[in-house]
Amino acid sequence: MKTIKISIPSLIDNIKIVESFIDNARDKFEIDDDIYGNIMISVTECVSNAIIHGNGKNKDKLVHLELTMQDEVLTFIISDEGEGFDTNELKDPTEPENIEKTGGRGIFIIKHLTDDFKYEDGGKKATLSFYLN
């Protein structure tokens, strides 16, 4: 099992660091383009959520990103230092009353682009898995 970890201050500009991290993973683990696109969109969206909603853009709080490769499964664990949230409170963006809202689509998109997605630790930790075969 291979694990790579980074931590970034909660500044939205640091998404560039996450993109480089994913690019390096693509080279290291020979990720094909279809899965690469899904990884890039869902991991950067999840890190953005951690920066904005989890840590409230507080640059003194970190977002931790861990990548593990085991048995042809690439797993990203993203955690923040915020208060967490009730994951049952997430609204379905496809419901008629939510269609016009500008926010609330990120988690919906992530769930559709990953092979497995879950929240832990009161919403402070997200696990995104991608099957490489």
Image (cartoon, rainbow, N blue to C red):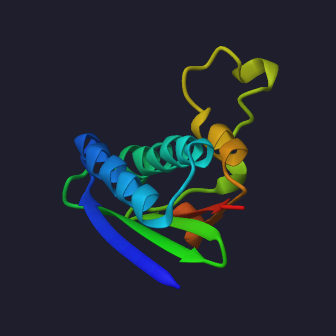
Q: Is residue 90 left or right of residue 36?
A: right
In this view of the protein, which residue sits in the foreground, 6 or 124? 6
Q: Is residue 30 left or right of residue 81?
A: right
Please name the residue shown 57% across and 50% down the image: 32
On the image, the x and y values in percent for residue 15 come to 32, 45
Please name the residue shown 31% across and 51% down the image: 20
Residue 2 in view here = yes
* Residue 101 sits in quarter: top right
Residue 57 in view here = no
- Which residue reaches farthest top? 100
Q: Is residue 28 left or right of residue 74?
A: left
Please name the residue shown 47% across and 63% down the image: 78
On the image, the x and y values in percent for residue 92 come to 75, 35
Rendered position, 103 above or below 57: above
Rendered position, 52 above or below 28: above
Q: Is residue 131 left or right of residue 18?
A: right
Rendered position, 9 above or below 40: below
- Which residue reaches farthest left? 60
On the image, the x and y values in percent for residue 81 come to 37, 65
- Which residue reaches farthest right? 96
* Residue 98 sits in quarter: top right
Rendered position, 120 above or below 100: below
In this view of the protein, which residue sits in the foreground, 24 or 94? 24
